[in-house]
Structures are given as C-alpha cells and as structure tokens.
Image: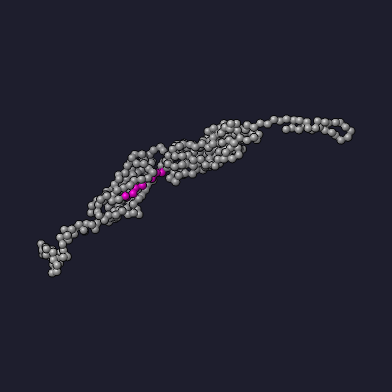
Amino acid sequence: MFDFIKNRFGKKSHGSQSRDGLGSKLSKRDLFLEPLEDRRLLAADFSLSVSDGDVTEVGANPGEFTVLGTGTTAVPTVINLTIAGTATAGGTDYSTISSTVTIPAGTNTSQTIDVQGIIDDSLFEGDETVIVTLDSIASGDVGNTIDQASKTQSVDIVDDELAVVSVAVQDGAASETGPDDGAFRISLDKANNTGDTITVNYIMTGVATNGTDYATVDGTAEIADGNMFVDVLVDVLPDSIVEATESVTITLNSLTLPSHVDAGKISIDTNNDEVSLDITDNDSATVSIAATDATGAETSGPADGGVFTVT
C-alpha cells in the first residue's frame, strides 16, 4: 500500500514526518476526504422562467414555470417556493401549487411547476396573477445558489367575462318643495369583483344648471369592489325664482379602469347611456292690474289718456 501512496503523491519527505511515515504533505485527511472535496465542487445556479404564459379561463388553459439549474449537481436539489398574486389557489382560481420543487441531479437539469386546475367562473374580475418565487434552497449540493435576478416570475390568468355599464333614473320625483332630491343609478350588469374601483365618467346637461339648481356633481362615479351600482344624487337647491320645470340630463361618456382589467372586456351600453329627470318648481306669482292714471278726458286740446299697470 505504501508503494501505491508513494506513486500517487510522490516520494516521502525526509523532513518532518507524521507517525505513518508519509510526510507532512500527506495526511489521513488527504486520503479519506479528497472525494468529498471533489463533490463540493459540484453546484448549480437555479433560475426561474415562464415556459407557458398563455393561461386563460376559456378552456381552463393551464400555465407553466420552469426551474433550471445551470451547472452540475451530484444529488437532487429541493427549493422552497413562495406563491403569491391576486389569483386564489385551492380551487378558487387554480389548484394549489406545492411549496417545494425538486430538481433532479445532473448537468443543466430542470423541473416544471404547473399552474393547473384553472376555474372558469362567472365573475367579472379582470386578469389575475400567479407569482412564484424561488425562496431558498432546502437541500442539495453545498455550493448551490439561486439567481437573484430571475428568482421571481408571474403569469396572468386571463378573465373571459364581459361587463356592460348603463344608467337609469332611480328617483325621478325631484322638486323644490321639501326639497325632494332626485337620483340616477349607474349600474354594471354583474358585480365588480376586480378588487378595485371602476370609475364611470359622465356629463350633466339640461335646462337646470349644475351648481345652481342642484348641488354640484363632479362628473365621476365610482363602483366599488363587490358592488353592482352607484347612485348620482340630484340634490335640489330651492330658490325664489318663478320658473318652469327644469330638466337634468346625465350622459355616460367613458370609463377609468384598474390596470389589470382589459378595456375590451367592459363597455358602456349605447342604448342606455343617457337619461333625464325633471326638477319641479314651487314658486308662484300673482298677476294684477291697476289704474295708475285713472283720469282721462275728452278735451279739445291734447288728449288726456288714462294708464293701467299690470304686475
């Protein structure tokens, strides 16, 4: 065995020697741990990418992430995952994704993470995200690392529902008497489940004057998350002017949407985008006539006529 060692590592030193006679440059650690040190040289850098981002409710089309280990590993690598996003797992929007992924040992090996079990619901919610992050290495070769620049990726689950916005008179009994306010109702044909506000922009016209005959309205109405409608109040301001019944008209003209809602999925109903109500006046007046010059005479001189005044 000594001859083998001498051939492998060279002649023994004539200087300081260990008790086994192999010299100071060769120890038992060299003999028994060298294979382990070679193994420590094996490692990979793990990155995450989107390998299938076409995820839709239509046809319950799934998505896919891929974890790639660039390098060579001696044993399988287990990586802890963090799953986030606006989409809800557990069968609400998609099936639950495991909290770990195992990448096989070898050179430049990879493993996919599937986004499957897509639920085609009837909610108007906009596109929803699934975000996966390579969080930490649970086990594997000592030198393994996670590429920080590409450790987080996301896919969108594209919503397929459509929504329509319309307006109607909610309370048309507007009057200066009381006063009695009127109201318009701006509605979605299905609940807003986008997790955000949908803003409807409108203009007010008619004979009645915004800010004079009724309290100022600013031209925007917000349908909150979870709601189907919002009312625009016509807050009547009584005056002492005798005037005819005055109309108030609301016209829907545009929408302001959350960033994750496709503008092509929601529209204004052009057959129900404008409606009017009337504000009834409560002022009255009395018409009278009086002779302000009751003396008139037939004379041979200038005519002396009388005068009536109507008030």
Residue 109 placed where, x, y %? 27, 52
Q: Nearer the viewer, residue 39 or 266?
A: 39
Give the residue drawn at x 23%, y 57%: 40
Numbered range of the magenta stretch: 127-135
Residue 48 placed where, x, y %? 33, 51
Q: Nearer the viewer, residue 259 or 54?
A: 259
Left or right: 291 as drawn, with respect to 109? right
Give the residue drawn at x 18%, y 58%: 33
Give the residue drawn at x 49%, y 38%: 165
Left or right: 75 as drawn, with respect to 290? left
Residue 124 visible in the snapshot = no
Task: State which quadrant residue 22 falls in.
Answer: bottom left
Q: Quadrant of the C terminus?
A: top right
Above or below residue 289? Residue 219 is below
Give the residue drawn at x 28%, y 51%: 137
Residue 201 placed where, x, y %? 52, 42
Q: Quadrant of the N terminus?
A: bottom left
Residue 121 visible in the snapshot = yes
Q: Nearer the viewer, residue 52 or 48?
A: 48
Q: Main secondary structure of the magenta part?
A: strand
Q: Is residue 102 magenta?
A: no
* Figure disc tally: 0
Residue furthest right in the image: 300
